[in-house]
Image (tube, grey):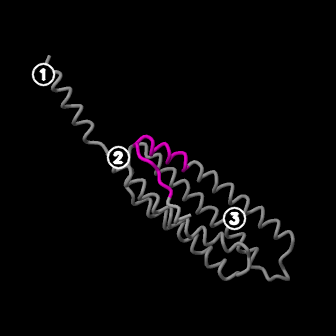
Amino acid sequence: MKKVILIAGALLVIMTSCGPTQDDAIKYNDTLVDIIDKLTEKQNLFLNQLDGHNIDSLKITHQLFAQQAKVSSEELAKVKPFEAKNELGKTVSDLFTTLNSVANNEGKQMVELMSKDSTQYTEQDNDKVRELAAKFDEQYDKAYDKLVSVQAAFSKEWKFDLIVDKDKN
């Protein structure tokens, strides 16, 4: 009987010591957040130019945002999955896919409309920009809300607190 208990105990120690640790989970989360932050920075630069006052800055920041969406997806592809189901990694990938789509669709269309000469820009163009902006926001909010939910579940599962860096907001 003692042998069975010792063998079972040894197996339990081996099985629990081979898997990822809480520190590994934190490092994985931080790696993903760093990639997200780079994209968020470019997204915010673009969004801050949507007032239309400086068309050149609008075009430049849009291009930077679209390029970073692609680069972020490539960086994420290089990150090894943390666990078999990799739900957090897949959710970040979905966020990047969404941002890549809105950058190259709604964002691009907004830039094209807002780049018109002021004598050519109509009220219909303005309505279309608002419509595109609403669609942009809706798609982003949906992907971001899912990320927040999955990230919260991940941190709960691995027993660590998510810390919001207020300097980045």
Q: Position of residue 86 (x, y in %)?
A: 43, 46
Name the amino acid type tagged 1: Lys
Label 2: which secondary element: helix
Q: Position of residue 25 (x, y in %)?
A: 38, 49
**Dot label at residue 3:** 1
**Dot label at residue 22:** 2
Residue at coordinates 51% horizontally, 55% vertically from top-left? 93
Alpha carbon separation for disc pair 2 and 1:
31 Å
Would residue 11 appear left or right of 110 to someone viewing this image?
left
Label 1: which secondary element: helix
Residue at coordinates 59% horizontally, 61% vertically from top-left? 99
Closer to the camera in the image, 137 or 69: 137
Mark 1 closeness class: few <14, some 14–19, many ≥20 residues within 10 Å: few
Label whose residue precedes the other's in the sequence (2 or 3):
2
Label whose residue precedes the other's in the sequence (3 or 1):
1
Q: Quadrant of the C terminus?
A: bottom right
Closer to the camera in the image, 110 or 49: 49
When the figure is inspected, residue 102 is found, relative to residue 85, above or below; the finding is below
Residue range of the region highlighted in magenta in the rendering: 147-164
Q: Nearer the viewer, mark 2 or mark 3?
A: 2
**Dot label at residue 106:** 3
Q: Quadrant of residue 155?
A: top left
Name the amino acid type tagged 2: Gln
Label whose residue precedes the other's in the sequence (2 or 1):
1
When the figure is inspected, residue 75 is found, relative to residue 92, above or below; the finding is below
Mark 2 closeness class: few <14, some 14–19, many ≥20 residues within 10 Å: some
Q: Quadrant of the N terminus?
A: top left
